[in-house]
Image (cartoon, helix red, strand yellow):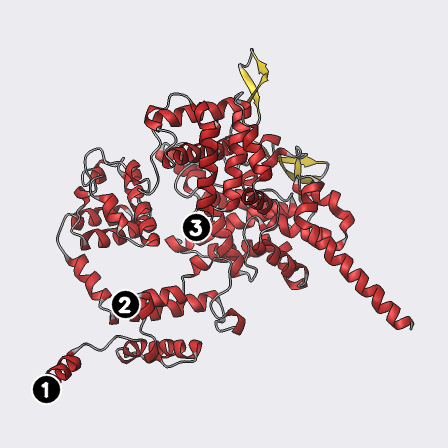
Amino acid sequence: MGLFSSASQMAMTTTLPAPKTMQTVFDETVNATERNRIMRLSEFFAAPLSTFDGADDADLLTWFDTHFPPVKNIGAGPLPGASRNFWSSKNAYSKWREVVRRRIRSTLGLIDAKKALRERIDGWTPFLALLENLSKDQGPVHPATFGAIRTFSDRARAEGIDPMDLIPDVVPMFLDKMPEHTRHASVLALKALNRHRIFPQIAAFLPKDFDTDYLIPTARTPVPEAVRKMITDMVETARYDLSTYDDVSESSSENFNAKTAEAYRAALIALARAAQDTGVVDLSSLNCLDTLFETHVRIPVIRHWINLSEKDGGISHRTAADYVRIVAQIGKANDIKSKKWLKNLKKNPHLQEGHAAGEKMSPKSRDFCEKLIHNPADVRTFLRQHVLYQERAKDILATDKPLTGSQLRSARRLATCAAFSALEIRGAGLRKGSALAAQCDGVDQNFFRKKIGENKIFELRIAQKDMKGEYVELPPIHIRDDKYFGHDVLDWYLKTARPLFDFANPEYCQEQQCAQATHLFVSEKSAKPLSGSMLHRWLTRSSAEIGLPMYPHNFRHGFATLLLARSWSNRGRAAAYLGCSVGVLDTYYGWIDKRQKLEEVQDLLAEALIEK
């Protein structure tokens, strides 16, 4: 190689931009506090900042998000570095992450790029101004919804997409380019726009007949409406016991409730979609669902589900087993031969594994229970958390100033968790769906104020059809005023906290001329009951704040564990409290009995050693 060639190559090498590392982020940060927070990365990994360039994860931001996810994604799980107690609290971790992430985005030029996008004058400019105005002063657009739409607009602007361009020919391809979490957030923003187009001023910025039905993931085979209608009819046939038909009321008793019916419809839709995907059925020409239950469909469909269950992002073995069980159940109820589906469920090893998984306690739940019974402080927190949530909500409400939007939402969250916990702890270990179905008003009211002698009580009645598995019908559940503040918390919730929800506030409903909510637990945005997913998020966050991260279903597991850890002979009491069978307890909590027996043997061996 000649001298000039070498010099040329050296010049090219020296002009290449230096890769941006966390050291670059540190060097470009002026604020001393922020520099200290960035330096904590070096402490966390025990390595120089210059070694972190995000090469394996495409860029620094992706690398950072992979190693330090947001608190909402962590949920009730441990923080990064939890084994070393690296963070004093989730709040401290969240603030640290926000600062460092912002500095990384600044170094990568993402903040300037976003600023430039938002300064652009295009179709989004007047639309976002309108949405922002409608989000103020308790307007029809929730501030969080406006924030989600504005974030979506940043992505759309970067691709040159205006609000009027949000049509089926454009949006799916636009979404397909995004990472999964970004795509999910974008779909939620589009659905929010779909809900709000009832307002003419919003609809004016969107395509005519704007609809989001086309947002069904492109990877999923569409199921024709005619097939969906047949599936609904088949599930409704299985839902009602025609032998109990009463010609006066023109009704029959239910075999399962509406929520279960939704799950059954989803399973049959999965059956139809799998039949199309495997090429054994053409859904567009299907005029009878009997074909879907036949052997030439059954075998490839079950194989397809098993294959999906062995792939990342596919369904689980448990889901595959549930699908097969539901198909057999609905087929039998419609007089269609489906015994071979049940035979596969019993004989196929993959389906057996999935079915067994559904009969066992999940590793996360068992970990929660084992930690609970070994920590008396956690037991105390667990059994009085309704009071702890109430205290925090009262602290927020103890002000003469108008509540900010953030304070109002926190008060609603904590108050709901307080009432839900009081119902669980001082009433009975209800499943989330049963508790959220409680109604304190209206024709279907099942939550009442009563008096027994001198004592005040709340009474909740849960119909057997609303019990998962319908093991037993629970007797009326009483929350008494003489048992550790359960009645007090619920009374405070009904009088003070529930009216904080617009659609549970009589004055708001009268002013807006809208229906008032009848459910005990109310949605923030409508008169509908609070969704299970929202309760899950609220309790996950609230429980972490009191130092005992848990999910709603952990109430049931916690109660059963505490009872059975005292004595395995408490199985009958635990089954009555949870509204399940003793056999279910044996399946889920047998590990407690085994542990107790092992400890008894260890004690006997220790005694024998002492005697010698």
Q: Which mark is residue 108?
A: none
Give whichever of discs 2 and 1 has the lower sequence position: 1
Horizontal and vertical percent position of residue 611: 91, 71
Label 2 crowd bin: few (<14), some (14–19), many (20+), radius 10 Å: some
Q: How many marks?
A: 3
Q: Left of 328 or right of it: where is 504?
A: left
* 511 and 410: which is toward the camera: 410
Label 3 crowd bin: few (<14), some (14–19), many (20+), radius 10 Å: few
Q: Which mark is residue 105?
A: 2
Give whichever of discs 1 and 3 has the lower sequence position: 1
Identify the residue under disc 3: 311
What residue lies at 57% left-to-right and 26% top-to-bottom?
255
Q: Is residue 484 visible?
A: no
Asked whether disc 2 touches disc 1, contact meaning CB atoms under 8 Å apart, the reply is no
Horizontal and vertical percent position of residue 41: 39, 76
What residue lies at 19% left-to-right and 57% top-to-bottom?
118
Horizontal and vertical percent position of residue 345: 57, 37
What residue lies at 66% left-to-right and 42% top-to-bottom?
578
Q: Is residue 224 visible?
A: yes
Q: Which mark is residue 2?
A: 1
The amino acid type, in three-letter code, at marker 1 is: Gly
The amino acid type, in three-letter code, at marker 2 is: Arg
